[in-house]
Amino acid sequence: MNSFPPLQLFISPFTIWSRLAWKAGEMAISSAQVIGQRTNRLALAGPVPSARDQREFALMGREKGEAALESAQAAGVRMLLLGQQFATLAFKQALSASVSLMSIAASRTAAESVDRQTRLVRETMTGSAAAASKLSGATARVARSALKPIHKRVSGNARRLGKKR
């Protein structure tokens, strides 16, 4: 079946989720900076904002829409890929289980039958743990793909708006 090292089953998704949490934290800090700078700019602009302020305010709205669209597209592409991968995994597991069940049915002795049943249970449990690990990691990758365009924009805005003029 799968020769996935047991420790790796837990470390890989943990690492992926940790990186995602780190990126989300970076984005939260950058977002707070950008929101503060833009709120201050809105307050200082008054009822008649300058042309530069008007461009910045228009950019705010456009960027949000573009980032949301890119995020949805990235997540959608990842989800399509994920569906294909898990359909393949499910088919392989079903095929492996049917071969094992046929092997049990073809057993000549009770001891052979018990041995094959034990192997089937062990392979099923290992396969289930590996599938759960892969699902967890794949889910984090989908989230990371969705976060990437937003993180890129927020971080860029924080750098751009943080520069002294």
Image (cartoon, rainbow, N blue to C red):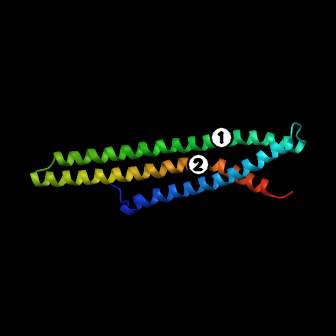
Secondary structure beneath label 2: helix
Residue 47 as seen in the image, left or right of residue 75: right
Residue type at tag 2: Ser
Examine the rendering and report whether any part of residue 103 can be seen.
yes
Measured from the top left, where is residue 3 in percent x and y?
Answer: 35, 60
Residue 145: image tag: 2
**Residue at point 66% right, 47% down?**
150
Measured from the top left, where is residue 145 in percent x and y?
Answer: 58, 48
Residue 7 as seen in the image, left or right of residue 96: right
Quarter residue 46 falls in: top right
Name the image quarter holding the N terminus: bottom left
Residues at badges 1 and 2 in contact (C-beta under 8 Å)?
no
Name the image quarter holding the C terminus: bottom right
The disc, 1 or 2, on the residue closer to the chain's N-terminal end is 1
Location of mark 1 (residue): 68
Residue 28 as seen in the image, left or right of residue 13: right
Measured from the top left, where is residue 67 in percent x and y?
Answer: 68, 43
Measured from the top left, where is residue 128 in percent x and y?
Answer: 34, 50
